[in-house]
Image: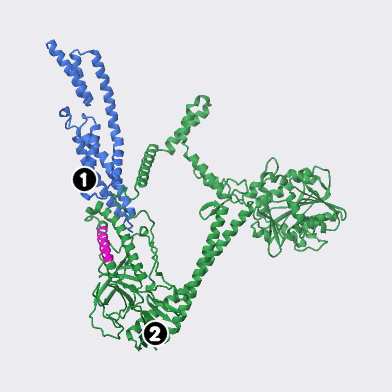
Chain colours: A green, B blue
Amino acid sequence: MSVFLQERADGGCALYIDGDLQFDTTDEAIYHESLVLPALILAAKAKSNGLQVLICGGGDGLALREVLRFPGVDHVDLVDYSNEVVELGRNELSRYNLNSFHDNRVQVHIADAWEFLKADSKYDAIIVDLTVPKKSEDTTVFTAEWYACLQQHLTKDGIISINGLSPEATPEAFWCLCNTVKSTGMHSVPFRVCIPSFREQGYGVWSFLLASSQLLFASNLKSLRSPIITRQADISRLHRGARFSRESRALGARIPIHTIAKPVLLPLILNQSLPQPEAEFNEFDIEPLIAAIPALHPQHTRDMIEVLARQVAGSIKSIDISKLVDALLKRVADLPGKLIRELRRLKTYLQNAIFPSKGVTRLTARLFAVLVITMTLANAVAPDNAFAKGSAGIGHASMGRGFSGGFAGGRAGSPSAGGASRGGFSGSHPTFNTTSVRVSGTGFRGSNYGRSGMTDMYGYHYTPRVYIYCGGGYGHSHPMYIAGHSNYRPQHNPGEQHQAMYVADEDMLIMDNGDIIITLSDKAYLLLAGGQLALMSVNSVDPICPVGTNPAMLATIVDELKSQKLAIQHETVARRDWISWTGWTSALFATVKGDKTEVANMEDLIRRIDLALKQVGVPAQIAVNVPSTEFTELFTGGFLRDNGDILIQQPDGKWLITDGKTMRFGETGKSSPCPVELKATLMDIMQKLQKELLGDQNSYANELAKLQAEGLTIDRDLSTYNQLYLINNYDPNYEVDYGTDSMSVFKAISLTEQDKADNQKEIASLEEEHRTGTADLQRLNMIIPIFGR
Amino acid sequence: MTPPDEQAAAREHALSRAKVAIHHRHFAEAQRLMDTAAKLQANRADLQWLHDEFFIEKRKSENREVLTRTLGPIVCGVVYLIFSVNGPREWTIPVWISLAFLFIPAMIGFVSGRQISPEQAISKRFWTAFRNVAIGMFGYTTMSLIMLRIRISQPDSSGMVFLVGLLVSMIYAAIAGTIGGLAAKFAYRWDPFEKGASR
């Protein structure tokens, strides 16, 4: 028996025995007053003084407290087989039972109740406060024999009060108890009482029974008047709980009694509302039968029983009944003639009715087994080569884009405190797993590839994008509005039209000539060509101004493109093999023709990525300067300061500083008017970033709520595991469910604590992101209205 | 009437030819030669020995034919499996075609043909070898295409892909089977009794 006393911070406590709540100090008085007082009031009607009382169970002393409070009680015998509970009642619970065990009217017997009642003693009231049975041996003190034994120890007008069961959660068990008491010839009155703490545990409404050899009716409860003040129970209204509906009583009429010879109570307690096995029982349907199997142990759940039963059913199904019958028929000499005939009939039935195509089934099963073994072995030996002519495939990775990163408009994030740190590009390489990439879109298959629209590495098609800017390709030096630290230079190039061919990232496009464009807004973008990075506008053919290239960013771009190229190459290999098998059918099947086009286009894309890798070139290695004051990063090398200045790092490491009206090189450089195009472009970038940050802010509350909800779930799980750990006597190996796994409770607690720590980290990270985002947004909100005014 | 020496020589010849015929599984010819030897008053013990050999070999031959039909496709499949597992990367398509459509079918077909008694109709040898090789090739092609297609994700084309796979597998099976059948047809080309075989 496991006894657990849960003490709360508010000073209250709750006692659990074998995981079942016995009482909670918040409402235990309802329980104990309802159990004790009605019986004593009725007993006192016949004998007002010198009451002899027996308490069976009730080692916590709380029922004893109520008995001793009642006037006229002369002697109380308390018999409980658990010394542990009695000691708890004497010590920890003494302040709740008002030191009842020290009253000289009380005699405590640590003994089995059956043994104790062998003595010839009579009582005016017997209070039966026993725990709900969880094992078959515990149910002996709920049998008709037990109640008959109690009856023998009652005085003529004596009365028994019994702690009943829940008529709500276990109605069959409740009525079984009522019928059992009645079967002894006593008159009994059951009544219900609502105990909030019991309800919280899912026990439902609780019940008690009064039983006596004298006439006893529900109406007797109406006249109950307590001579002592009750704390929580309303004794005068107990009769209201003694009314039961017709359906409920009809159910009670069908329930058998519980005796030692025919115990029925435990299954009725453990199996709440078992389905009726006879209902819609189908010859070939095992489910009703499985559902009808009762649980016979408190730790057997319905799920466990059903799983076990299905395993047994599966084993039985796997028996070759036909063979079994054959084997039996071989031994017919020892069997009676009628049984032989029945076996032969069964054999005929099995052959004709159940397995008409047994031979075919066996052959198919064998063939299937051979195929499975062959394929498994082949795959084990050479997972990528078997059945595929030695190609190096990409394995059996799950569908999933497997790509994270994002250049976030080329914003780099800064190591400096207080700086903006948004965006996926932060100098570290994006996590990109080539084996998890699957080209599943149709972008490479259609004739649109290379003509209209762009394609990403997954084969998804995007609407076309055309940029017109000064061409020249690798090694070409672009004339710029602001170049060589000189001022505005007029636009003199006609411009070349280039189409974006490949979407390497949501912000990074590869053009038909291999140039790389990093989009910053609808109008502004960064052009990376020939090792030079320039700020561009769609309204201008020439670059607005050069931007210092961040070596870490270029390294990331190169790595990104290389890994994407590798992934596409992997995908191409499988397709090329497929074509080598089926290519000759392209005239017949459009899908094969599409496969051929797809391979050709993917190979074309690989060439373009190679070109782009060349276009990145070898930039000048400059140190990344970060402005010393608080700033918001607008794009790589472009920062917004609190005073409204925008700083753009130049290839030589110096800063171009503009407030929208004037511009200068370096803090102390000579000021000149800011070109209109530069101002408009920077304004566009700021407005785009403002929108993005606003969107982030709006989604923050949702994301935080989601993470917090996850945190609550984790807390609840942790609490459940801890309870299980405690209830099972601190057994670290007790098996529990963890998600879809089963593991020791100790490991489950450890993993759940890890989950909790991760969840808290995520929340902290989100809050930090929100904090910096808010600061950036405030800065932008302040600067945008006054920029260039 | 045949002179005694000539009779003895003819008897010895019949006995030795019968032995060779049994060894080469020309059982009708062997039976005829044994009858001739009996007429020529061959030794009863020799005849009995030949009879025993005849029935043992005939039973063996029948068993081999049954095994060829049942195990042939499996052996062919295993050969293709080994072929697919160990394909060096340097193999070009022509090399692969030569091996998959010529060498392996011819080898399997030839071996299958040799397992069938030379007395059986050549068409039977052809179809037995055809069946063995075609099933092996069909399985190999089907598996290869399935494994390849698993690695290629293409939405909304599964019906068409199934048809492509089925057609390709069937045609490849038919080609390889034909090669195998032809190889089986020539399995007894150099057999001393082949001329007498039924067509």
The N terminus of chain B lies in which quarter of the figure? top left
| Left or right: B189, with A534 as reference point | left
Query: Residue A392, how many percent across, how many down?
Result: 31, 53
* Residue under numbered circle 1: B98
Same chain for labels 1 and 2? Say yes or no.
no
Query: Residue A600, how many percent across, how many down?
Result: 24, 60
Query: Residue B70, how many percent across, how many down?
Result: 31, 35
Q: Quadrant of residue A491?
A: bottom left
Does residue A609 show up magenta in the picture? yes
- Residue at 36% x, 88% y is A662
| Amino acid, disc 1 | Ser
| Amino acid, disc 2 | Glu
Q: Which stretch did the figure color magenta?
A: A595-610
Chain designation of label 2:
A
* Residue under numbered circle 2: A667
Q: Please say whether residue A59 is visible from this viewpoint.
A: no
The circle on residue B14 is: none
Q: Which SS type dominates the magenta stretch?
A: helix
The C terminus of chain B lies in which quarter of the figure? top left
Compare residues A361 and A596 and report the one nearer the observer. A596
Query: Residue A609, how many percent across, how many down?
Result: 28, 65
Q: Which element type, helix, strand or loop, lies under badge 1? A: helix
| Left or right: A650, with A224 as reference point | left
- How many C-alpha atoms fall within 10 Å of the one at disc 2: few (<14), some, or many (≥20)? few
| Left or right: A721, with B20 as reference point | right
- Residue at 36% x, 76% y is A520
Q: Which element type, helix, strand or loop, lies under badge 2? A: loop
